[in-house]
Image (tube, rainbow, N blue to C red):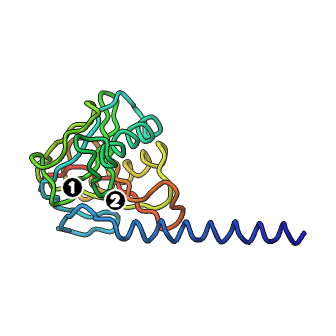
Amino acid sequence: MKIFLIIIGITIALFITVQIYAAMTTKKSSIQAYKVIRTEEDFEIRFYPSVTMATITSSAKSYKELSGPGFRKLAGYIFGGNKGSQNIAMTSPVHMDINDSASKMSFVMPADYHKDNLPQPNDSSVKIETTTEEYVAALTFGGFASDKVIKENAEKLESALRAKSISYYGNFRFLGYNPPFQLFGRRNEIIVSVKL
């Protein structure tokens, strides 16, 4: 019985340590810069300047199909899978544009990187792209993402935008801010481009 309690105590201590480490790592990560233009009850309007991203395109039609394989390819690139075996700092959020034609997952590159000074990916499916600046509506939610949760929150954002007569265009996209092993304090967002 005593050994069992010791094992339980060690397991709990390890679990708490991993969660504290995950929360601290997330707080230290560089977050994509944006400016809040307007705040509403359920969402906010943001301005995102242009950034450089590493992106993969996939035939996946769901979060479940895209998240694992897409993350592995992009993580491979930033953790040395490039010409020169250079490590590139992880930033947040991870962008996902999931739809029925061609879905995309992107990592935002740190601010001091751009197309001309990033190493070439070893994996030809990883493309380096520069986004255009844009205004978006963003709805934030916690917990773990799933196809059902993403759909529910996209519908919630769409309804809130219609109620405020705000025009939007393009796909509703998912932003994930936390590593998968972080259980608490998770941040997720749904964004869509808006016309101001």
| Residue drawn where x is 30% and y is 48% of the image | 78
Which type of secondary structure does the marked residue at label 2 adopt? Answer: strand
In the picture provided, is 187 more to the left or to the right than 74? right
Q: Quadrant of the N terminus?
A: bottom right
Q: Position of residue 194 (x, y in %)?
A: 18, 52
Q: Disc 2 marks which residue?
A: 139
Q: Position of residue 137 (x, y in %)?
A: 25, 57
Type of amino acid under label 2: Leu
Q: Quadrant of the C terminus?
A: bottom left
Which type of secondary structure does the marked residue at label 1 adopt? Answer: strand
In the picture provided, is 92 more to the left or to the right than 149? left
Q: Position of residue 134 (x, y in %)?
A: 14, 53
Quadrant in the rendering for residue 88: bottom left
Rendered image: mark on residue 72 = none
Near-viewer residue (144 or 155): 144
Badge 1: few (under 14), some or many (20 or more) residues near its Cα, within 10 Å? many
Q: Disc 1 marks which residue?
A: 136
Near-viewer residue (174 or 37): 174
Q: Return the residue found at the far front.
A: 84
* Residue 172 visible in the current orientation: no
| Real-space CA distance between mark 2 and mark 1, rounded to the nearest whole angstrom | 10 Å
Quadrant in the rendering for residue 165: bottom left
| Residue drawn where x is 33% and y is 30% of the image | 58
Say if 127 sits above or below 161 in the image.
above
* Residue 110 visible in the current orientation: yes
In the picture provided, is 153 more to the left or to the right than 195? right
Q: Are marks 2 and 1 in contact (CB under 8 Å)?
A: no
Q: Return the residue found at the far right.
A: 1
Near-viewer residue (77 or 39): 77
Type of amino acid under label 1: Val
Near-viewer residue (115 or 188): 115
Q: Position of residue 23 (x, y in %)?
A: 46, 69
